Structure formats: structure tokens, C-alpha cells
Image: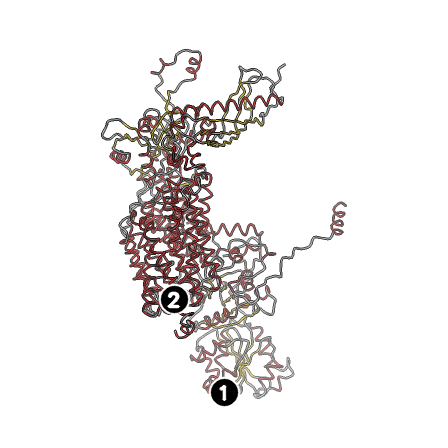
Amino acid sequence: MFKCWQLVLICFFIASLSVIPGCWDHSEIEEMALIRAIAVDYVEGERSPYLVTIHVVRPGGIAGSSESAGGGDSESPDRIFSATGATIDLALQNITFFLSRRIFLAHNEFVLMGEEAARQGIYPAMDFVLRDNELRLTNFLLIVPGAAHEILAQREQLETGLSEEILGMIAQADESSESDPIEFFKIMRSLSKPGQDAFAAVINAVPRQKPAEFATQNNGAAAEGNNATNTAKILYLSGTAAFRGDKLAGYLDKTETRGLLWLNGDVRHTTLAISDPLKPSEFVSVYITHSQTRITPVIKNDNISFLIDVKTEGNIYHQPSLSDLSATEMSEKLNSALSAVVKKEIEGSLQKMQELESDLVGFGNSIYRKDPKKFKKIKKQWPEIFSDLTFQVHVEANIRRTGQLAKPIPEH
Amino acid sequence: MLEKGKISPRQVVELIFITIIATAILIVPAVTADKAGHDAWLAAFIGSLFGIVTLYLAIKLGNKFPDKTIYQYMESILGKYPGKLASLAYVWFFLHIAAIVVREFGDFMTTAIMVLTPLSFFAISIIALSALAVIRGLEVIARMNEFIIILFISFFLLVITLTFNNWQLINLLPFLTDGITPVFAAAAVPASWHGQIIALAVILPFMTRPKRAFACGSTAVICSALFLTLGIAGTLAIFGPEMTASFRFPFNLLVRTINLGKILTRFEVIVVATWVSSVFIKTSVFYYCAAMGIGQIFNLREYRPAVLPLGIIIASLSILLFKDVVELVDFLTNSWPLYSISLFSLGLPLLLLIVAIVREKVFGHSFQEDKDGV
Amino acid sequence: MKNAFSILKKLLPKTKTKKQEQEKHPQTKEKQSNISSLSQRVDYIKEKLGYDTNDVVIRQFSSSNNKVHFAVLYIDGMADKQTINDNIIRPAQSDIISNFAHKLTPQNALSLLQEHITSGSEIAVVPDIDQAISLVLGGDTALLIGGENKILVYGTRSFAQRAVQEPETEAAVRGPREGFTETLRTNTSMLRRRISHPDLRLESFFVGRYTQTEVVIAYIHSIANEHLLQEVRRRIASIDTDSILDSSYIEEFIEDNPYSFFPQIEHTERADKAAAAALDGRVVIIVNNTPFVLIVPTNFFQFLQAAEDYYERPYIGTFLRLLRLFLLNIALMLPAVYVAVTTFHQEMLPTALLLSVAAAREGIPLPAVGEALIMETTFEILREAGTKLPKTVGQAISIVGGLVIGDAAIRAGIVSPAMVIVVATTAISTFAIPAFNASIALRLLRFPLIILGAIMGLYGVLWGLVFILIHLCSLQSFGVPYLSPLVHGSAGDMAESFVRPHWRFMLRRPSLLAVKNKQRQPGISPPEAAPAAERELTHENTEE
């Protein structure tokens, strides 16, 4: 009779032998440099053109700030390190010479790309993010007009660290819908689809202006001379970088970005100013609560056009004009004014995309879905066809509620 | 009888389901997306239904020889020595599957979770566990599976639910762009996975109500087909067919896209853990089938003495068979379907059935007498 | 001598199957017939029990007509002297009490004494002096009659015993507060009081060569499975050992797998729990001299159920069951998972948590696994030291150990606060599991899991868990799979391991016990609403 437990014991023994030299992937938590952001810049003409800057959080810094009772303004826990390399990972390897800890990328939240690097193409960054087993697909890609490392040199304003600050700004982007920060896997998804180009949000560091300077600016006086006194900059998340293929083609400003979001049906909330039907010089602002978009390609022989249907709903948010808009026909007028504003934004955005020959909405892809054979024929010339396309934009806007006030505040 | 335990029809369903889906979900999405593009989900579904064919053959044979495993009735059908030879071929087949499963598991772990850990470590550790389970018998494997299947299904559905807000179902369009041909070409791979249901031919005699075997088997095949289709549809909807095809293990990346409120995120290691336990079940099932085969071919009183040597063989095969992960995936995509289906999932069972019927109908041989003689 | 013992083992105190026994062992009978005179037998007893044994009382006296001589044998402290005096010695000695006393002759003494003279609720006629001695050692009183080989044994057991108290180990807010005591009869009476049905059967066994401990199996004849009963009888009868001092001895002798970490037989101190088990179709094993009765067969989920689950609302019962299941996992895995996550899978932690854990770990000299092992060991030391001391001192230990040392260790930077939280949570979870013996298993298994977690990360923890699962799946308790309702059970049974159903819907007994009578109650019968007239009446009443 063979004894089971003997066999088990042998198996166990073999298994345990292999375990003894184990701990290959072991690393203690305090031996790792927690990287929260990577900035990639491209320096033309060098043998190692990629300038990579990492943003590391020092855990001790955070603990120290909460425990040190005496100190007033605590030291920032953020540290940045830079190095150049022929590729992103080689640059990272060169950074390790400055680091006392292992680079740990799993907690990286976003990759910033400088304008020059983005013009060279984002595939290298894509590949790095997707291939690495630590980096996550939910990282955000942000494009910086200018040098990416400058963003990481800024100080945080409200949060405990710069990365938290930028994450907070990304979360807030829904409020205005003037920026659409999206994750890597979504960018990659648009990149890989036939008949669609990718876009990414833009982040910039702008000179910080004191309230008084805003006042002088509005009065028409030039504020440029004051730049020497305020070198401090502040982060600014707005606008969109449009790609053609994987290369940066140009930028959409914030209104055009909102037009893109209308087209994609991604407008969550935003406040739009429309002119008062009674006093055209004054504004009524509407807070958008819902929006929905449908894009239908119309293919007649070689003639391609698109029907764009946008349905949106909002509430009156603010009405400084004090004119009485409570009548039914007034709300009709407000609705048509609102749809005109939305339509204008959409058309402006379309025009910009056509200028850049960058199909950020995926019009080509909708043709591909409808008639794949036809799209295969025109695939090569799609950017040119796209720039000459005609769109019929139809916006149906409804203002559902007027806030807490039914009528304007009564004047005596 | 080498196995004293009995397993219930429900356990059979669960065992087959896990046995098929465990590694299918790992490799099949990328392979089918590569070949069938937008229609990969359809390819997976069609391919999966091939399992019913193999199942039908296995059960037809099993019904002719109740209480006999495939190893035993092959001797009755083909004669003693040809039967033993064919049995050895099946033992090899099961060992081969087990080795591939272990290799897939090791390659996945070293790609996605623990990059620096050597492959052999994963191979040896999981085989040590499987050996223990095989020694404890089929009943124990089936019971463990009842636990593991709960985890597997709940985590699978959780992943699908949590990623759903990122699904773009338009990625599944256009439908059948290039006709049905690439779909069938892609269906070969999921079909080869579902052909592994032939392991039921070994387990069938140990089932408490063998009459329900076909119902059980087809339930399992359809469930695994649905899960596989859902998983592939998910990866297609999140990444699009082009990206899915370029990933090594798409479903893992699907899990990594989950980010709900910054809380339900970063838990792919737990999902992987449930997946690893299902891989353990799959390895154990094929390991068990191979050990049982050795026991019955050589008329051993117990199959347990064969367990340890077979474990060593599986571990070595898993490391030696393939040079690298590229070779592994290439083999599974191009050679494996032809090899496994033509020989073991369809060819041999069909041959056995035909020979059995011919011997019965034409030569008037009665296998029932044979059974009494044994 | 060995023969005598084997007879005793098979004999039940109330059912005297003497003839059978005599036929089986004729040599014993011969030996008996030699010792016929009273003084010879008294000498035999003295020799057997020792001349110097001072709690053995042999009182010799004669009947009033001086024709018959008696010897009364009892153990001081175990028999009721008052009863012996009033009901045995005095009636036999004088004819004032009984009219028959003067008729006594050696020939008729036995029947006269038994039927007319002496009084006692339990009287047995025992042919064998050794058997009489063993009964006397249990507290009975033997009356030896000169010129008569048979011995009269009176049931006079009376000794100091603990009163029925609330069970300390299984306290409940609601429900009966009666716990079993060390006295077997009290315990069986508690069971009998709960199940007043002729089908409650109690069978006795005597186990232990020296201790001769009485073991009773209690079951409901019309419910319990016959194969199960035979198996229980077989296993108990096959025990051959010196001593049974607690039911845990029996447990270890009859459990299926002696090498397992996990308890395979449930024990309880609560009479209501034992009764409920019997009503489920299980067998209750009551052992003399211990308040803990055993329940077989047992499945793992019984250890997660408290009696109180069935006395409170079903929702809280269900919630507590799920909570305990969660705590079970915490108690088993939390330190291991913590070690694995902080040393292998740092990406799993939310960034803020990772940063604070990393900050707390700055400057700690030990790796996470060292910290975990030290803290776990410290906890075990504290627990052990605390339980072995009187309650008041024990509290001091826990304060000094838990608070002072813990706080000092953190301040000194030896361990990180996160680890202290983890270990404390684990410790509390361990105590939340109702069955102490199950939580011991978890406590022990925690250590290997920590080490596996430190070597291979979560894969290692999983490896360990699957290893444990293989073991649990191969365990059986009296033919029932250990993890039964969850594996191998019907859907209803499976649900019942997580959900406490409403009593109105608990229609069936657990199917895996293969009971004879599956139905608990015929069906769902909601109590009818009060008739309208009655409702009006009460309404009027309240108005007045």
C-alpha cells in the first residue's frame, strides 16, 4: 500500500526547496520612490533626445508635515528628477543614478508630454505605458504647450502635492466641459480605430496674476511690464491637443474643446452665456445638465455628409438683466438662443478640426461602421475628404427650470 | 476501481466550465481579435459550440460502456495493445494540456504580476498543489471547484459590471466586414479549447447520475461559451479589435482599466488570484486524467504512485516545450487547434465510435459480454 | 481481571443482562461460587480495594432474628448516608419498621429484602462481586447477604456537584441560560426536559480502563440516520484507553483525521444547542464529568453559528453569520495579506494609504514580515499570559502588554502603527468567532501564511489557502463532508450556512445527514389574522 502522505511530503519538500531562494519580486515599501507623474520632453538634435522628468513623493515629507508642531509652512513632499536618454525607459534608467530608491511606477497618475515630444509622436509613450506591468492604463495623458518639465516644477496650491492638485483639476474638468482629460486606454482606442484621430487635454503653467493686475488689464492697460515681479506660475487645465496619426497637429481652444465635447456627447455640465432676448446687450447664463448627440453619416454615391443631432437640457443659472422672461414665448426664444450658441460652438470646433485635418470625433469611423467597403476605398484620402466635408448641425435645446427664482427680483 | 469517490452532476458542470474557461479567457481574446477583428466575439461563440460535438462523442461512447473510462473501453474496442497505445496517446494529450496550462500561467504571472520571479518557480509550486489535490482524488477536486467557481464567476461579473461604463459597443461594428470566413478561421482556437471537454470521457464513470451527463456537459459548454463571448465582447468594446489583437493578455488589461471613484481600482491582483485558483483546478483535472490513465493502462491497484512522476514530467514539459511566450502563443494559435481537434477531440473518438458500431452491427460483437469478462 | 473489565464495559447499569454474561464467562461464575461466606467476600473486597483505603466503608450487621448477616459497602462521600441508614440498614436490622424483618433467613433474604424490607427507588440484583464493586465505586451501595451469592445494589449516588449555571463560553443575550454541568444525569435530564418525546434515546458506554467514564449517546430514534448511529457506536466502543477525563479525549479518539488542525467535532456547553442538534438528526455524545457535550457529525459552518442566531430576528442572525465569515477570513489572512501587499503588490494600496504606510515604515529596522511575526507572537504571549492568571491580574497584563508595550514599541520605532492596527484587528476578529477550537486553528495557520506571503506575495497566500482548502475538502466528519452545505449540499442547505431562515420557512432538516424524517414542519402556515369582530372589540377597548 502506497502511503499518500509520503508522496505529499515529497511534493511539499520539492516545492519548499524552490521557495527557499524566493523573494524575487520582494521590495519593502520604504525602499521605493513613489512616482506620481512623468514629464516627457523632446530635445531636438541630441543623441539622447528624450528628457524625462519624474515627480516623486517623499512619504517622510508628508508624515513630517503632520507631526512637526512648531514649523509653520512645511516643506513640500514633492521632489523632481530629470535625465535624458535615447528612449523614455533609458532616460528613466539614467535617473536612477540620482535616486536612493527603486523607481516604482504603479502609482503614476499622468504622463505629461511637451509640445515638441508630442509633435514627434506619442507612440513611444503609448508603448511604454502599455508594455510596462506597473504603469496603469488609467493614467492621463496631458499635453503641455512648451516644456513639460516646467509643469512639475510648480508648487501645489490647495492639495498636499502637485499630483493631487492636477488630479483634482482633472476631476473638476466636468464642471466647465472646456477640457476633456482622458485616460491612456481611451486615447489608444481612438488611435487604433480606422477613421478617427486622438486628442488629449492640454495643461499649461501661466503666470500668476494678482487680482489687482486683472483690474488693470481690464481697463486696457498693459500688464506685461509686471512680469518680473511675479515669476510664480499657476497651473491651468484647458483646451485640447489634436493629433493627426500619433503626431500633434494643433490645439483647440476652450470653446472649440467644448464644441468637440458636444460632438462626442460628453458635455456633463457647463455654463453658457446667451444674450437676453429682451435686452440683447445683456446676458442670461444657462447651466447645462444633460446632453446627447447622434451623428448619422449620409452617403449618396461619392457625396458624403453628416447629420449631427444634439439634444441638450439646462437650467437658468443667473440672469443679471432683470427682464421678465417668465412668459412661454420668452422661453421659446431662450431655447432657440441657446441652441444657436451651441450650434455655433460645434461649427467652430468642426471648422478647426477641418483646418487641422484631424478627425477627433471619428466621422470616418462612422462611415467605416456603416459601409466598411466604401471606407476602405477612401481611407487613404480621408484627411483631405474630411477637411471638405459638410455637416448639418441641428441642436434642440430646452431650458427646463429657472432656479429658485420664477421671475426677476421685483424693482420698485 | 481506482477511484472510489463519486461526483454529482452539478459538480461535473462546474468542473467542465472551469476547465475550459480558465485559460481560454487569457489567450483566446487576443487570438480571435487578431483573426476575426470586430467579429471575434462571434468566432468565440461559434468555436465554443464545437465542444458539443466532442461532448456528444464522449457521451455516446460512455453510454456504450457504462462504468468504464476511455482508457478501459479503448482496449475493448481496439484490442488490447492498440488500445493501450491509444490510451498512452491520450495520457500524452492530457499531460501536454497540463503542461501548456502551467506554462500559460507561468508566462502570465511573469508578464503581469511578478516579473522577476523565474518561470520554474510557478510551474513547480502549482504542480505541487495539484499533485496534492490529485492524490486526494476527484471528489476533492470537484469540491474545491465548488468554492472556486463562486469566486471566479462573481469576480468575472464584477469586472464586466465595473468596466461597463467604458464600453463602446460601436466597437463591435461593422458586423461581418469580410464575410464569415475569418470568423471560422478564428473559431478554430476557441474550438480547440472546448475540445478539451474530452476529459469528461475519463470522469464520466464517476458521475452519480450518468444519464444527465449530456445535459450537464452542454450546460457547461454553453455557459463557458457565453462567458468567453462576454469577455471578448468586453475587451473589444473597451479597446477596439485592433488594440485587443496587439495585447498579450487583453483581459488582464481590461481589469486594469477599472477605476471607479478611486476606490474600486487597483484590485487586479485579487482578480488574478481567483483566476490562478481556477488554473489550479484545470491543471488538477488534466493531471488527474493522466494519472488515472497510467493507473488503468498498467493495471495498477492505485493511480497515486503515478502522480509524482507525472508531476515532474508536466513541470519539465511546461518549461522545455516552448522557448518563449511568442512560441507558446504561436503554437496555440496555429498548430494546436489542428493537432488537438483532428486527433484527440474529434478524430480518435469518432474512430472509436465507428469501430465500436461496426463491430457491433457488422460482426455482431457484444461489448456487454466483454464487460462481464473483465 | 481483564475479563471482568470487558464485561463491565458492555454492561449497562440499568439493564442487567446477567444470564448472558454468565454464559459467556463460566469461569467467572465458578470463581464466585467459591466465595460464598460473607467474611470471605468482605476480605475479597478489602483486598481488592485496598486495606488502607479510607473512603471505603464496610458496615457489617445482622438481622433482628440474627439468622442473616449483612455487610453494607459504600464509598464515603459518594453515597447518601442518610438513605443508607434509613432505607437499608435500619429496616434490615430491626423489625420495628418492617413486618417481614423477623422472617429473614439466608434463603429468602434476597427476595424479602428486595421486595418488602428495604426501600430504594433503584435496586439491582448483581450476581458478580466485581460488578457490584464497580457500581459501588460509582456511588451506589451494595448489600451483601451472608449465605447468598447475589448482591443487592441500591442506587444511592449523591455527591457534591456544581449547580446548573449559565455557560461561560457561550453566553447569549437571549435564550435559555442553562449550561451543562459535570454530572451526567443532570445533563441527560436537561436534554430530556427539552425533548419530551419517547423517541429520544440515550445509550450508555463505559470507556476508560481506570476511569470507567460513562459516555452516553443521545439521539432521536425517528430522525437520526441508522448508519450514523452504528458508526458512532462502533467508534466509541473501539476506544481502549486508560482514562477519559474530558469529552475532548473522546473527540480525539473518534474524529476522522487525527492530523488535521481543524476541529472535526463540535462541542457545546449549551443544553439548547445540544437539543437542537439532536433534532437536526445529529448525535449528541455526553461524557460524564465534563460540561462539554460533543455533536456529530459536524461541518465547518457550525463553528460560525451561535445559538443566539436562532433566537433573535432572522436578519440580524444572517448579518452576524456573514460578518463572522468575513471575520474568519480576516483572522486567517489579514496579517499575511498585509505583508504580501506591502512588500509585493504596493500598487494595490490607494496612493494616500500607501504614502502613510510608507511614512510610518520609515526608520523601522525590521522588514514587514519580521514586524508581523514579532507582533503576532507578542499577541499570543499576551493572550496566553492573560488567560492563565486570575481575572484581575489578567486585565493588568493586557493593559501593560497591549497599551504600554504597544505604544512604547511604536514610539521607539520598532514597529509601525499600521502593523499594530493589523494585528489588533486580527486578534479581535479571532475572538469574534464563536467556537474557540476553530479560532485556535486559524491562529496557528496564520503564521505559515505570513511566511508564504513574505516569500511569494499574494500568490503565496493563495497557495497556502488552496493548500488549506484541499485539506478541508478532503476532511469528513462521520461520512459528511466537512465543508458540506457549501460543497455537496442542496441549494437550500447551502443558503442556510450564510442565512438564518425564518423559523416558519425552515421546513426541512439538513439533507446531508440523510435523516429518516426530513420534514421539520408540514409547510408555511401563516397565523391567521384575527377575525374582524375581534379586532373591533379590541379597538373599542382601547377607545374606552
What secondary structure is found at the residue carrying circle 2?
A: helix
**Residue tagged by mark 2?**
B355
| Percent of width and height locating residue A177 | 46, 28
The nearer-to-camera label among 1 and 2 is: 2
| Percent of width and height locating residue A380 | 36, 32
Evaluate whether residue A176 shows in this view: yes
For residue C220, the mark is none
Q: The disc numbered 1 marks a residue on which chain?
A: C
Q: CA distance from mark 1 to mark 2?
A: 87 Å
For the residue marked with disc 2, what is the amino acid? Answer: Val
Which residue does the image show at 57% across and 84% down from the upper left? C110
Q: Check disc 2: other Cα within 10 Å, few if <14, some if 14-19, many if 20+.
A: some
Q: How many marks?
A: 2
Query: Which quarter of the image is occupied by the N terminus of chain C?
Result: bottom left
User: Is C7 situated left or right of B88 in this image?
Assistant: right
Q: The disc numbered 2 marks a residue on which chain?
A: B
Q: Is residue C514 above or below residue A249?
A: below
What secondary structure is found at the residue carrying circle 1?
A: loop
Q: Is residue B296 above or below residue C542?
A: below
User: Is C519 situated left or right of C537 in this image?
Assistant: left
- Between A112 and B37, the one lying in front of the other is B37
Furthest toward the front, the residue is: A301
| Percent of width and height locating residue C301 | 48, 57
When asked about the image quadrant of residue B61, the answer is bottom left
